[in-house]
Image (spheres, rainbow, N blue to C red):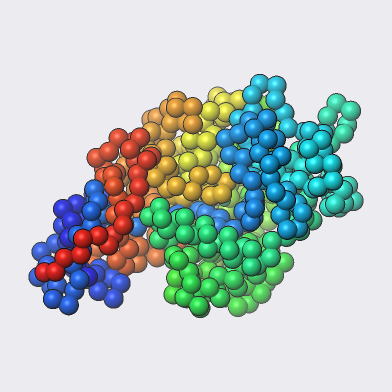
Amino acid sequence: MLIEHPTIYLDAAGERTDALLIRDGRVQATGDDARHAASSDDETIRPDAACLFPALGDAHIHLWGFGLRVGTVDLRGMNADEALDALADATPRDDRWVLAANLDEHQFDDGQNLTRKQLDTLFPSTPVCIHRVDRHAVWVNTEALHRTRFDQIYNPSEAGHVERDADGEPTGRLVDAAAQTLTAAMPQADIAEDRQMFLDSARRLHNLGVRFCTIAFCSVAHLEMLTDLADDGKLPLHVDVLVDGRDPDFDRFLREGPIHRPRLRAAGVKFFADGALGSAGAHLLEPYRQGGTGLRMHPEGFLKRRIPELMEDHGLQLAVHAIGDAAAREVLDAFEAVSPAVRKKLRPRLEHAQIVAESDQPRFAELDVIASIQPIHLHSDAPWAPKKLQDHQLRRLFPWQRLKPATFAAGSDFPIDDINPWHGVAAAITRRGADGEPFRPDQALSRQEILAAYTTGAAFASHCEGDFGRLTEGHRGAVIALDTDPFGAEPEQIWDLQTCKLEVAPGNR
Ligand SMILES: [Zn+2]
C-alpha cells in the first residue's frame, strides 16, 4: 500500500517524508521514490491525522500479574474514605476474595489511614487484599491473614516488614517479602485468567500506538502461554520477554535456550536488586530522611556471580531492577564483570535508574548499559519524594541528562503506573509532577530524546531495531496516525494526544 500524508515522520529525530510504500509489511520506499515505485495494485490511503509516526515501543511493562486480576477494584487516585466506599461496593470474585489495586497512601488526607480493623468492619468474613500502587506493599484484613495462615508461613528474617501499631498488633500493611508471602498464599490466577488479562492489556497498548513491548517479568509457565499465543498467531504486538531469574523452573528455560518466533523473543532474564521508593524499599547508599537504607534483594555477591554466568555462558540479555543508588551501583558492578564484547552484543539493561550516585552516572554509557526509564514515575513520585529523600538524594533523582550519552529505552511500568506512553513523553519534557510543579527541569529530555527512547531506544533494548523504531526502508511498516504533532504541540496537548485510524480516505491513483 501507498500512504500519503504531508507529515510522515521517519524517526524521532524529526526526519520527514510525504509518502511511504509498504509491501509485505515492510517499508519499501519513501517520498517520490515511493510514488514512482507504486503500481496500480497498491492501495493508496491518505489518513486524516495531524501526522504519521513510527509506532512506539513500551520497554518495561507488565501485562498480567502485579495485581492485574479479573474483577480487581481500581483505587488509583483515591483517599482512604473513597477507597473504603469503592471496596464496600465491590462484588467478590468467583473465589470470594475482594481484590483491589493502585492504592497510594500519599493520596490520603492528613491523619487518614487504612487499617486492618477498618477493613474488618466492612468485611468480617470475606478476605480482602489491596495492592499498593507500586506492588511493593499490600493492605489486608484479618480474614486474609487467617486464610493464608500468614503467621505460620512468614519468615521475619526475609527482606520484608509487617507494620504494627502501638500495641504490637499488625496494622494490616505488609511490605515487600511480607506482602509477597501473603499474595503467594492467596488463590492464584490460572493461566486462562492471565491470558485474558494479557490480551486485554495488549489491546489497550495497541490503541495508544504501541506495537512492540518488553514484558519486564515473566515466569517460565507464562512464557509457554506466550509461545502458544505466538504459534496460534494471536499476539497483538511484538513481545520481548524478560524471564524471572528466580523462577523454580528457570533451569528448564536455560536448558531449552532463548525463544525466537514471529512476534516473540525471549532471550532475557530479570532480577530485582532492591524494592521501590514509595515503600522505602529502594536500596540507598545513605539513609532515607526517616532512617533506614532500604532493601537488598540478593545476598552480597549473588548478582556479580550470576550475571556474568548468564551473559557469558548462556548468551542471555540481563535486566535488573535497581531504583536506589546502592542498587544501581551493585548492578553496574555486576555488569562490569562481564567482558566488554559480550556487553556490547547482549545490551544489559538497568531498569528504573531512579537514584544514581554521581560517580556511577557515566558508567551507563561506559559499560554499554541501557537506561530503562519510566518518565511517568517522575510525575507520580515527585510530589512526595522530598518527604522520603534527603536533599542530596533528590538532586540525583531521575538524573536523565546526567546519564547521557547512554541509550535510553522508555516504558510505562503498567500497571504500577499509567499505561499511556504519551503521558510519559509529556512527563519527560516537562518533568512536572502530578501536583503540576516542575521537578529539577534541567534534567528534562528534549522531544527528540524522549521520542527516541520510546522508538529506536526501546527497539534497541529489545534487539528489534531492524524492524521497529523507524520508518526508513527495510523496517516494518509499523506506522501510527496521531491527532497531534508531538514536535509542534504544547506538552499538555501531547498528554491528551490520541491515535487516529490509519485506514481513512482510501483513494485510487
Ligand atoms: Zn516493572
Whether residue 192 is visible? yes
Which x, y percent locates residue 346? 47, 64
The image quadrant that residue 84 belongs to is top right
In this view, 20 is above or below 176: below
Which residue is at a point 49% across and 48% down the rendered structure image? Answer: 419
Which residue is at a point 48% across and 72% down the rendered structure image? Answer: 234
Whether residue 137 is visible? no
Which x, y percent locates residue 211? 40, 61
In this view, 219 is above or below 136: below
Query: Is 483 or 13 nearer to us in this picture?
Result: 483
Is 13 placed left or right of 280 in the picture?
Answer: left
Which residue is at a point 77% across and 54% down the rendered structure image? Answer: 96
In this view, 173 is above or below 35: above
The image quadrant that residue 437 belongs to is top left
Query: Is 343 or 450 nearer to us in this picture?
Result: 450
Which residue is at a point 57% across and 35% down the rendered structure image? Answer: 77
The image quadrant that residue 428 belongs to is top left
Which x, y percent locates residue 190? 69, 65
Which x, y percent locates residue 78? 61, 34
Query: Is 107 or 450 nearer to us in this picture?
Result: 107
In this view, 358 is above or below 217: above
Query: Is 82 or 489 nearer to us in this picture?
Result: 82
| Rendered-image quadrant of the C terminus | bottom left
